[in-house]
Image (cartoon, helix red, strand yellow):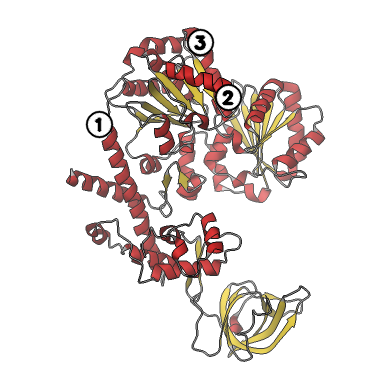
Amino acid sequence: MRLEDPVSGLRGVGGARGRLLEILGITSVSDLLYHMPARYEDRRHITPIGQLRDGRVCVAKGRVLGLKINPARKRNVNVAVFDARDGTGAVRVVLFGGPASFTRLKENSVIYLYGAPSFSDRGFLEFVSPEYAVFGTENGTPPWLCLWPIYPTTRGLPRSWLANTIKSCAASPELIPEDPIPTAILEKYSFPSLKKAFEGIHAPKTHEDISRATARLAYQEFYEHQLGIIAQIASTSRLTAKSASAGKELQDMFVASLPFKLTESQKKALEEITSDMDGEKPMNRLLAGDVGSGKTAVAAAAAARCVGAGYQAAVLAPTTILADQFFDFVEKYFAPLGKQAAKITGNTPKALRDELIWRLRDGEIDVLVGTHAMLSETVAFRSMGLLVIDEQQRFGVLQRDKIAGGNRGTHILMTTATPIPRTLRMALYGDIAFTEMATRPGKGRIITKMISDNHVGELYAFLSERVRRTGDKCYWVCPLIGSDGGGESSVTARAKDLRKHMKDIPVEVLTGETPALEKTETMERFRSSGGILVSTTVIEVGVDVSGANVIVIEKASAYGLSQLHQLRGRVGRGNRKGICVLLDSAANLKGSERMSVLLNCGDGFRIAEEDLRLRGAGEYLGVRQHGDENFKVADIARDEKWFLAARDDAAEIQRNAG
């Protein structure tokens, strides 16, 4: 059995369960073995029945006495009631199951129970529906009497079946995984073999087994990833760049036409970018700018240099809203310079799209702004010199290469408004050139306040006064979308309630499920008419609306610090103060270390470091997968030591091979 073998070939995995495993992303033996436990339950120790305590999870063992099996009111469901007794006492047990569930349950048989007993209405302790195993003699023991892994699963796929299947696969003598780590490195760190590591994760005998196996698998992921980055750097180093030095005049004209002066932070970033673009090797740079730091102007200036040198530029945005905003900015300042900008999104009519594609191939279009619609094979440039990827973490490497034509001399500038801690950046991007911008040009302060959800009425009054008296536009962010009738903290329910209490104030709704064209129309109404926009986090990144100076974030404790910082960056983008209201229960807000960081710090880079420290890389990123890097075991916040070791080892192996 090899890691690449289909999971469908394993015993007990039929068509139905195979489809359920596929929902979990499991199609191969490798997927199964890399399906990591969410946690472990220590079931190794048996608690004497006389020492059981109300609500305390434990394992108990006793003999079945006074067994009664009765049909319940529900059809095809029986109830088994009995006492489990050992030498220290007895406890009542109540089990529910189908007609064939209790065939092994006999008077005086041995039973193991796992769960939390509780007091019944009559005042005695009882187990209701615990996990259990029955044996005819004292000789048997359940497979879960150990450090038992608890796996993420899906409806219809029992946790116990999934755990036993993975455990059986990991321990199988037929499993022959090829170890990607050289023997010398295994010996250097006293790592277990790959097979032993799988056993240490899925069938551990001690917590030390779990720790050693986790360290080894984390190191392996970092090691393989670093080898890939080294190979990528080697391949791109052989390419010759399309120098943009001839575009300096147009870039200077563009910057001079802006109605504001670039900050020192913007100037420094632009100098680093243009130095790359004028060089002999293709630029591959990540521009990380705190919210409101002015990344759009810098990226557009880079595009002007590219166009001025006789090449075309492309700007890839993750959403229609961001594509619309970037296009409006570029068109406004490029048109007076005699340069053509165009936009392609999922909303672009076919006839117009066909026309734009022909003009793009003929070189009539200097800058093309678009969403994923740009990734179509029909979209081809005459001579692309620069690819700007806005909010790059939302696109994978294959998507970047596809639009850049395999990066044949094309400069790539990736931008992100999510500050990335240094170690995490090294893990994800290797030695990629990095530019950091933190200054907010000419922006007002943002005041952050915490309010208990017991004071929603007062908050409504405050918003109503702000909208009517000052004309401020307001965002209200909810964690859920909801449906008709909504639910607590849903966009639907909150919009309905706001309309009920503020009948003369426009209330717009925007979620990720809103059709693209409707999103554009909604944002245009909000920009022109103001009022309140009730939304999910779809407004998190890049949305810039003049006059939007108040944002309410409902159930604030459900978000990470970096995400909250991104959201509050949607306001205070003019010269007036922005106000960010964190709305949650008093219990979630009081004494929260995370909230305290946000209240006392406005630096997104410091906040990102704290977010990584408090929550770990997987939670910091929102999902385990970030771009194309899918670390199933490794967490850079927890495993920084192994990342640094893997990076150094991979580099040394590459030097020795070269």
Q: Is residue 147 left or right of residue 51?
A: left
Nearest the eye: 7 or 546: 7
**Mark 2 touching mark 3, by CB under 8 A?**
no
The kind of residue on which mark 3 rests is Ala
Label 2: which secondary element = helix
Nearest the eye: 343 or 554: 343
Determine which residue is flagged by label 3.
Answer: 335
Locate residue 263, reporting x and y percent: 45, 19
User: Residue 220's image quarter?
Assistant: bottom left
Determine which residue is flagged by label 2.
Answer: 350
1 or 3: tag closer to the N-terminus: 1
Dividing the image into 4 quarters, which one contains the C terminus?
top left
Q: How far separated are the C-alphas under marks 2 and 3?
A: 24 Å
The structure residue drawn at horizontal position 47% and vertical position 40%, both measured from the top left corner, is: 608
Label 1: which secondary element = loop
Dividing the image into 4 quarters, which one contains the N terminus?
bottom left
Q: How far separated are the C-alphas under marks 1 and 3?
A: 36 Å
2 or 3: tag closer to the N-terminus: 3
Tell me the crowding category of disc 2: few under 14, some 14 to 19, or many 20 or more residues within 10 angstroms, Cα based: few
Locate residue 545, reporting x and y percent: 62, 24
Q: How far separated are the C-alphas under marks 2 and 1?
A: 39 Å
Tell me the crowding category of disc 1: few under 14, some 14 to 19, or many 20 or more residues within 10 angstroms, Cα based: few
- Residue 443 in sight: no
Determine which residue is flagged by label 1.
Answer: 238
| Depicted 537 relative to depicted 153: above or below | above
